[in-house]
Image (cartoon, helix red, strand yellow):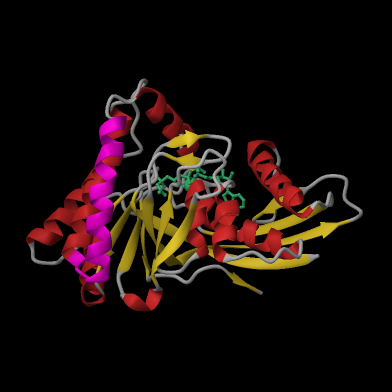
Amino acid sequence: MKATAKAHTNIALIKYWGKRDESFILPTNNSLSLTLDGFSTTTSVEFREDLSEDIFTLDDKRITGVEYDRVRSFLDLIRNLSDKTLYADVHSINDVPTAAGFASSASGFAALAGAATRAMGLQLSDYELSRITRQGSGSACRSIYGGFAEWQQGVKTDGSDSYAVPIAPVEHWDIRVAAVVLSADMKKVSSREGMRRTVDTSAFFQSWVDSIPNDLEQIKQGIQERDFEKVGQIAEANCLRMHATTLGANPPFTYWADTTMTVMQAVQSLREGGISAYFTIDAGPNVKVLYLPENEEKIKTALMHVPGVTDVILSRAGQGISYK
Ligand code: ADP
Ligand code: DP6
Ligand code: CO
């Protein structure tokens, strides 16, 4: 009863920002992402008769507290599905900074879901796996697939129609992402808490939700046509609109640091100089820059020279979940 799975993080081009149901993790809008091969989690799960509780080890450290509780509750879901009561020994390695806005919860829960369901001997379709993964961390349901994926929010109250579907595989388009590292510190406001505060209090939340259908339609067209300008413009505007909702919350907050703005301006300067690039930012200060392969060298050099930038990690589109 042991299995190992590897999953990559994904970067949302149309953001998931808001839950309509916290316990099932049901979103207020569809979202769309690109899976990244540069960041991943590898997780092994073994269900054992001799354990009296779950054990969670992350990067060789025994985890307790809320991070442990999140994993335990997720394993409870899988125990319920299988009608078995065994506890698990979970070992996970993050090849991504944890809780710093690099989507460790996405690769983390996708890898955990894959390994735990396999270890339990469950045979799930990709949709079924995505649906259960969603309940660990919303963004994780998109990491089951390689390339572009869309999380369909669904309409049902039990979440049975809320899961991600593939939009275009890795081979469809060699679009790349530079992850600009400013800070690998843990963030102060988790995605979960930030979203909750936004839904409950932000004056701008409803207009955010209303803006999604048009963004989605446009970006899907852009992806099909491999229209980089179109995809980049929509992704950047969608990111800015998401971050605007946090400024309208009570108390207001932002994930940006001063260098976040500097990097955004550097991307705009690149464009003014004729090099096509667009940024997007998740719930953290670090910026991801979309670009095409022919501009890789120029993009990397320009970003590395921005004061306050500590690293630039280049990534291609990544594959979906895999098993060892
Ligand atoms: P991020 O931007 O890294 O996704 P979040 O606040 O969304 O930040 O989620 C971070 C949380 O995800 C961690 O505090 C932890 O609870 C969980 N997490 C991260 N990596 C793993 C992993 N490999 N296995 C299980 N849970 C993980
Ligand atoms: C800004 O999936 O980390 O990265 O569902 O509470 O675990 P939980 O939140 P999470 O939120 C991700 C928010 C985002 C946008 C996105 O990835 O779509
Ligand atoms: Co996350």
Seen at 73% across and 56% down, the residue is: 90
Write down the region rendered in magenta. Answer: 205-228
Left or right of residue 284, residue 271 in this image: left
Question: Does 226 sit above or below residue 129?
Answer: below
Seen at 29% across and 29% down, the residue is: 247
Snapshot quadrant of residue 114:
bottom right
The dominant secondary structure in magenta is helix
The picture places residue 228, in percent across and down from the top left corner, at 20, 67
Left or right of residue 29, residue 21 in this image: right
Left or right of residue 24, residue 219 in this image: left
The picture places residue 292, in percent across and down from the top left corner, at 24, 72
Snapshot quadrant of residue 18:
top left
In the displayed image of the protein, which residue is found farthest to the right? 50
Magenta-drawn stretch contains 220? yes
Seen at 44% across and 52% down, the residue is: 102
Is residue 186 among the parts visible in the rendering? no
Question: Does 18 sit above or below residue 108?
Answer: above
- Comparing 110 with 302, the one in front is 110
The picture places residue 198, in percent across and down from the top left corner, at 38, 29
The picture places residue 138, in percent across and down from the top left corner, at 50, 47
* Quarter of the figure that contains the N terminus: bottom right
* Quarter of the figure that contains the C terminus: bottom right
The tally of labels here is 0
Magenta-drawn stretch contains 313? no
In the displayed image of the protein, which residue is found farthest to the front? 156
Is residue 98 among the parts visible in the rendering? yes
Left or right of residue 265, residue 43 in this image: right
- Comparing 64 with 123, the one in front is 123
